[in-house]
Amino acid sequence: MHISEGVLSGPVLASGAVVAVAGCAIGLKKIDYDRIVHVAMLSSAFFVASLIHVPVGVASVHLILNGIVGLLLGFAAFPAILVALLLQAVFFQYGGLTVLGANVVIMAVPAVLAHYLFLPLLGKSPKLTFGAGVLSGASAILFSSLLLSSALWFTDKHFFETCVLIVGANIPIMIIEGIVTGFCVAFLFKVYPEILPKKIN
Amino acid sequence: MALILLIMTAGPSFAHKVIVFAWVEDGNIYTQSSFGGKRKAKNCKIVVVDEKGTVVHKGMTDENGDHAFKIPKGVNSDLTINLEAGAGHKAHWLIAYDEISLPSDSSTTDAMTVKQNLEKGPSFFKILGGLGIIFLLAFVLKRFKRKSGVND
């Protein structure tokens, strides 16, 4: 899901950077003092998730976890994902520094969307909480794939082919992330409900 | 079935660290492409350009992520080997003109060392360092919010 350096055009990079900065500014302003540690915990989970590879057929996929980060943090997902992606770029050479803004937008916007779409389901019942996690995890990957396709479209204009390839290739990740996010959210709901957004505590 | 085949062959799209490595030997340029470690970049496009950006060679990697070709005639500058692995994944490797005109064992050895370093997975200390930085930033933000009295 990380776009490499030298792929996107200047305007796309600049637009990505502007949206990422705006999102981070809103996120930093919205972070509740008591929830800063939760932001750090979820940012850490995002940071290491990409190192966990799951074999699928002859390929291997890795977790992204933007769904759970967004569902639990809302706009605070922007700074959480920015820091994690920056460290991944510096330490693991994933993505890159010039493309950081675009990568943040591709992963954080779907995360925030998942928060506003599925937050009402959280905490209603264990089943609905699990469902909210599944939907957040899967939809965040789907929207990220569409944003990634759009970013590439502005560069090579083959939107449909690129979109089919990227969304198709990410279907296993959607399923895996949906299940992982569902179980994580349901587990957190049971053992550590303080990490869930305040509205439902 | 088509979708399953698409998914099974779309390994490159899942990865994110893309590496291309090239060296000169016996009048040929050999390239190896991967996503780090043992994950080979199969059936990916290789585009070779000279200093002016003129394409001097195009090809595809094989099942092992390898691609070899004869040094194009008339080359009189450095060559950049570009790997296009699809879905926003790209990498490049520069071959200096000296290496093309006067290939030596030492340049290949140096390149091999760089390649091995690139293919190494992240170390435990880097992961730990990253986590430490995240919590350090959280601590700084907490101090800042406490001082400024911001508590939305």
Image: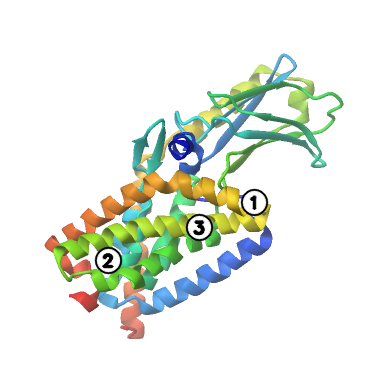
In percent of the image, x 48 and y 61: which residue is there?
A104
Q: Quadrant of residue A181?
A: bottom left
Q: Position of residue B147 (x, y in %)?
A: 34, 82
In percent of the image, x 45 and y 31: which residue is there?
B37
Q: Are marks 1 and 3 on the same chain?
A: yes
> Could you tell me which chain the residue with mark 1 belongs to?
A
In the foreground, A127 or B57: A127
Q: Quadrant of residue A8?
A: bottom right
Amino acid type of the residue that numbered disc 1 sits on in the rendered structure: His
Q: Quadrant of residue B99?
A: top right
Q: For this view, does A117 lie left or right of residue B2?
A: left
> Residue under circle 2?
A38
Among numbered discs 2 and 3, the one appearing first in the sequence:
2
Q: Is residue A98 visible?
A: no
Q: Quadrant of the C terminus of chain A?
A: bottom left
Is A60 rendered above or below residue A175?
above
Q: Is residue A172 visible?
A: yes
Q: For this view, does B100 lie left or right of residue A188?
A: right
**Mark 2 or mark 1: which is in front?**
1
Density class for disc 1 (Cα within 10 Å; few <14, some 14-19, many ≥20) is: few
Q: Position of residue A116 (x, y in %)?
A: 35, 73
> Residue under circle 1?
A158
Among numbered discs 2 and 1, the one appearing first in the sequence:
2
Amino acid type of the residue that numbered disc 3 sits on in the rendered structure: Leu
Is there a contact, CB below 8 Å, between mark 2 and mark 3? no
As drawn, the residue found furthest toward the front would be B1
Among numbered discs 1 and 3, the one appearing first in the sequence:
3
Density class for disc 3 (Cα within 10 Å; few <14, some 14-19, many ≥20) is: many
Secondary structure beneath disc 1?
A: loop
